[in-house]
Image (cartoon, helix red, strand yellow):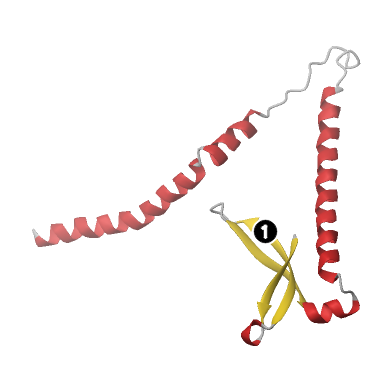
Amino acid sequence: MYVSTCKGGANGQYTYVRLMESYRDENGKVKHKVVQNLGRLDILSQSDPNYLENLKKKYQEDYAEKSRLQSLNRLAQVQSLLSFDNNSSAGAPLPLLQYGHYLLKKIWDDHLHLNRKFKDIQHRQTILLPALRFLCCSTDITS
């Protein structure tokens, strides 16, 4: 989430502050949506002249803290997998880790963009097949 401003009112005389969120739609395009309208900047700045800067700083710190916690969580998961002691398991085999599909999915989606290509082909088929059926049927009637 991030803080954004926009002009509004008659002739754009007011600046409005809003809390925004970015996300990706089903086609992979980046979209933005308003989470909360906070109000006019001139009214919000009356009590605190640095309201906008403080608000932006707060959400940047929240984002940094969230990223830091996610990194620590991933690190703990990796360390728990690496610290697996084979001697204490009394001859039990090491756990089978199957992560190859993550790499293939990343290549499939991000580099080759095959998911978008297949959706495009599927969309074209839904449009073209009825048209072809209509053309084939109409040629049979006229001949």
Q: Hey, which residue is sitting farthest bottom in the picture?
A: 10
Q: Quadrant of residue 6?
A: bottom right
- Is 123 situated left or right of 93 in this image? left
- Is 119 situated left or right of 24 in this image? left
- Is 83 situated left or right of 9 in this image? right
Q: Quadrant of the C terminus?
A: bottom left
Work out whether 137 lies above or below 51: above
Work out whether 82 lies above or below 60: above
**Residue 51, how many percent across, how many down?**
85, 71
Q: Specify few, some or many for label 1: CA neighbours under 10 Å numbering under 14, 14-19, or 20 or more.
A: few
- Amino acid under disc 1: Ser
The residue lying toward the viewer, choosing from 133 and 9, is 9
Residue in the image at 87% along x and 80% along y: 46
Location of mark 1 (residue): 22
**Residue 63, how many percent across, how many down?**
80, 53
The residue lying toward the viewer, choosing from 88 and 121, is 121
Residue in the image at 73% along x and 23% along y: 96
What kind of element bears circle 1?
strand
- Is 51 situated left or right of 20 in this image? right
Q: Quadrant of the N terminus?
A: bottom right
Residue in the image at 58% along x and 32% along y: 104
The residue lying toward the viewer, choosing from 97 and 138, is 97
Count of all numbered marks drawn on residues in the image: 1
The residue lying toward the viewer, choosing from 92 and 100, is 100
Q: Quadrant of residue 97?
A: top right
**Residue 8, how many percent across, how many down?**
66, 80
Q: Hey, which residue is sitting farthest left in the picture?
A: 143
Residue in the image at 62% along x and 32% along y: 103
